[in-house]
Image (tube, grey):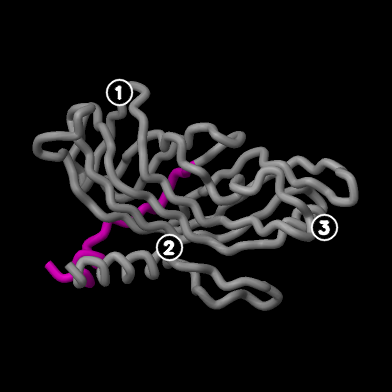
Amino acid sequence: MSCSAAYADSIVVTGAFMSLTGVGGNDPFTLEGDGLRVSGIGYENPVGPGNCNPCVAGKSVISFNSTLISFVHMGPAPGSVRGNAFADVFLDGTMAFRGPSFPASLVVSNPTPTLIAPFTFWATLRGFPNSSLTGTPIFDETFVGHGTATANYFLTSGSGATLVDFRDVVYRFEPGAAPSPTPEPGSAVLVLTGLAAVIARCRRRGAR
């Protein structure tokens, strides 16, 4: 199958979320769509809006790019993929969220210490019936989606600078067409799309 065909056959995520509270915490997530429900927990994956902690207003840049490459199983995780139901699943693969970057000073200038940004999503996930991740997978799929991410911070007045401390972030999926990579009027950044990740993956496959 060609890479373009594989992308066209991707499962579209139209609902649910990925979240993180505090630096160094786990990242619970749920992917929902037509015949789709997959839940799991990203384990020890740095998440973009919390990477510089504390961030320094006037110096640091806050990115909404986040990648999950390891997962932890915390109990039965029933769900379904393409309408095929399963009672539990152990996950392996990569999940990538791509969004814009902002200067940390923008958090300080906002009425509340919050940043809101669009994101696009791309993932390759395999689900297994056992923790050894061996045998025939329950599913082996590519997923795409988009939505809006909201990150919250605490502000602390430091010596000559304001420190921006990460509190939490939620990437919430939305239905409909993916957002344009062209910024809306007044926006200072370009939205990075998950399509770039797909193209890079295709090039790597072609080079093998």
Label 3 CA crowd tier, 10 Å (few <14, some 14–19, many 20+): few
The answer to whether the residues at label 2 and label 1 have Cβ atoms under 8 Å apart is no
Name the residue beneath numbered marker 1: 76
Quick check: 20 above or below 193? above
Front-most of residues 109 and 201: 201
Label located before the other in sequence (3 or 1): 1
Label located before the other in sequence (2 or 1): 1
Name the residue beneath numbered marker 2: 176
The CA distance from mark 3 to mark 1 is: 44 Å
The region drawn magenta spans: 1-18
Please tell me which residue is depicted at 59% across the width and 35% down the height of the picture: 21
Front-most of residues 204 and 130: 204
**Residue 10 appears anywhere in the view:** yes
- Find the residue positioned furthest to the right: 160
Query: Which of the two marks, 3 or 1, is nearer to us in this view?
Result: 3
Instruction: Determine whether the residue tagged by mark 3 lies in a helix, strand or loop.
Output: helix
Please tell me which residue is depicted at 25% across the width and 65% down the height of the picture: 7
Circle 1: residue type: Pro
Front-most of residues 205 and 145: 205
Instruction: Determine whether the residue tagged by mark 1 lies in a helix, strand or loop.
Output: loop
The CA distance from mark 2 to mark 1 is: 31 Å
Circle 2: residue type: Gly
- Seen in the image, is 84 located left or right of residue 162? left
Circle 3: residue type: Ser
Query: Which of the two marks, 2 or 3, is nearer to us in this view?
Result: 3
- Seen in the image, is 153 located left or right of residue 1? right
Q: Residue 109 carries which label?
A: 3
Instruction: Determine whether the residue tagged by mark 2 lies in a helix, strand or loop.
Output: loop
* Residue 58 placement (x, y as % from top left): 79, 60
Quarter of the picture containing the N terminus is bottom left
Query: Which of the two marks, 2 or 1, is nearer to us in this view?
Result: 1
- Find the residue positioned furthest to the top: 75
